[in-house]
Image (cartoon, helix red, strand yellow):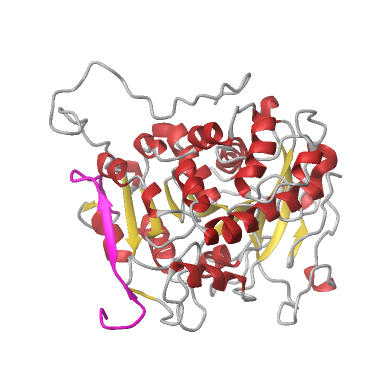
């Protein structure tokens, strides 16, 4: 299909000594071989022929697959990150889901108010709260795979790009809906960043690009509630950066079986500088993201301004994302500059610490998560990681003719292959290299990829 106008080149970067995965029914397979086999040709809408057009098309209204959620509010267990955050669980559509379900409509058949009393600003469409009784009885001994999702900057569970992945995984099976949950082959949840998707924050702590503490709590909670379920993770854009950091921080103790990330910005300072380098990057993308974050601040400023280091007078004047990070993230977390924050929160080095099968999907023409920020060399050093890069697709886009999004195909196929084919109980860690990365002798020095510069008192991280 290389002659097709929307056909994209697809390349894979991975270690020359890859992870070998045991399968449940057949011979062992090299991890990159599985990733290549499950990745279909990338044929995109030929009318959206560059990364800017692909990315801009996300602004065109598209309903996407209808995913229904019930929400549970969690209180942070780590006292260093006090506050609340919302997790949305994919559930079976209500009996009247054939009708249009509007936010607040009677078809939602769930609670409109949080039983914990934390509340919300405005619940997204097709979303209600669990009752206290439903929430208390979520646990089970089933072995269905569970997908834990992290959305992009200022987004939430309602985002179309993530619903394109969730829909085929949680589609109804012939057995019908399981009480309270999706009823499909998979179960799935979305961890909303603090203050996103209509949730309220209850402290001056918002979230940032290395905010792994909430997803860590959720993963541990899921392992307790569903001790027999294999757990998987997927992250998009900023959520991809957070998920990569989390998997790297956990290392060989990670409770996830495997993970996939989409449109990760990787080196945040590199991407920020690249955005500021062009008119479109600064005045379209950076300004749009800055406006989104400023709107988030306006929604939650009563809580955020309890931190006296944050200046409302300066925030209302800012225009761009890096200005928001300078005024809010630096003031909140104690970074001296946004550059220091970006370098500390970037996930490129985290790749070296990953110890679970990890698949990254990236578009080389991404105008937000720039190709120059992708840690290709780090990917080559770690047998647990594979990155698939397409020549086109933009940022969280990959629009095909007809409205589908190509990234959903390899993401879903990867997750299904991991859940159905791989015997995780028999994975053996690759033998350590006897030589340095460039063929020389090992040095006596130790590089610790997860050693962060920001000290977080009273926290494991």
Q: Is residue 141 above or below residue 436?
A: below
Where is residue 426? Give x, y as percent. Answer: 30, 42
Q: Is residue 155 above or below residue 18?
A: below
Nearest the viewer among 383 and 94 is 383
* Residue 38 seen in the current view: yes
Chief secondary structure of the magenta portion:
loop
Q: For the magenta stretch, what is the residue range?
A: 1-23
The residue shown at (80%, 45%) is 300
Residue 177 placement, left or right of 72: left
* Image quadrant where one finds the N terminus: bottom left
Where is residue 216? Give x, y as percent. Answer: 57, 37
Where is residue 223? Give x, y as percent. Answer: 55, 41
Corner quadrant of residue 130? bottom right
Nearest the viewer among 115 and 271 is 271
Residue 155 placement, left or right of 342: right
* Image quadrant where one finds the C terminus: top right
């Amino acid at each position: 299909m290389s002659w097709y106008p929307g056909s994209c080149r697809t390349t894979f970067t991975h270690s020359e000594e890859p992870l070998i995965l045991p399968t449940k029914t057949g011979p062992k397979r090299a991890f990159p071989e599985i990733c290549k086999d499950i990745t279909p040709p990338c044929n995109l809408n030929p009318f959206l022929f560059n990364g800017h057009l692909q990315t801009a098309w996300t602004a065109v209204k598209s309903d996407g697959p209808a995913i229904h959620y019930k929400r549970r509010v969690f209180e942070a267990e780590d006292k260093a990150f006090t506050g609340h955050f919302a997790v949305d669980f994919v559930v079976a559509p209500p009996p009247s889901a054939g009708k249009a379900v509007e936010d607040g409509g009677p078809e939602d058949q769930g609670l409109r108010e949080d039983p914990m009393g934390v509340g919300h600003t405005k619940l997204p469409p097709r979303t209600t709260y669990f009752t206290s009784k439903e929430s208390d009885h979520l646990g089970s001994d089933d072995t269905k795979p569970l997908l834990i999702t992290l959305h992009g900057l200022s987004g939430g569970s309602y985002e179309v790009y993530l619903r394109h992945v969730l829909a085929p995984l949680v589609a109804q099976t012939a057995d019908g809906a399981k009480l309270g949950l999706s009823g499909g082959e998979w179960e799935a949840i979305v961890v909303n960043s603090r203050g996103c998707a209509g949730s309220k924050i209850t402290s001056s702590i918002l979230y940032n690009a290395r905010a792994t503490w909430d997803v860590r709590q959720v993963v541990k909670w899921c392992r307790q509630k569903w001790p027999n379920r294999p757990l998987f993770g997927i992250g998009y854009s900023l959520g991809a950066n957070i998920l990569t950091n989390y998997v790297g921080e956990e290392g060989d103790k990670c409770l996830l079986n495997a993970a996939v990330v989409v449109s990760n910005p990787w080196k945040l300072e590199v991407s920020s500088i690249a955005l500021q380098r062009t008119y479109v990057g600064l005045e379209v993308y950076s300004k749009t993201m800055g406006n989104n974050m400023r709107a988030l601040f306006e929604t939650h400023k009563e809580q955020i301004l309890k931190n006296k280091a944050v200046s409302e007078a300066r925030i209302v004047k800012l225009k761009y994302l890096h200005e928001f990070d300078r005024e809010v993230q630096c003031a909140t977390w104690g970074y001296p500059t946004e550059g220091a924050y970006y370098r500390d929160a970037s996930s490129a080095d985290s790749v070296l610490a990953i110890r679970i099968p990890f698949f990254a999907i990236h578009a080389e023409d991404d105008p937000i998560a720039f190709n120059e920020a992708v840690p290709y060399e780090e990917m080559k050093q770690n047998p647990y990681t594979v990155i698939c890069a397409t020549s086109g697709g933009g940022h969280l886009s990959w629009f095909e003719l007809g409205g589908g999004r190509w990234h959903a195909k390899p993401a879903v196929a990867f997750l299904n292959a991991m859940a159905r084919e791989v015997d995780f109980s028999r994975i053996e860690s690759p033998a350590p290299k006897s030589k340095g990365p460039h063929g020389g002798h090992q040095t006596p020095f130790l590089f610790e990829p997860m050693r962060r510069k920001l000290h977080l008192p009273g926290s494991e991280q």
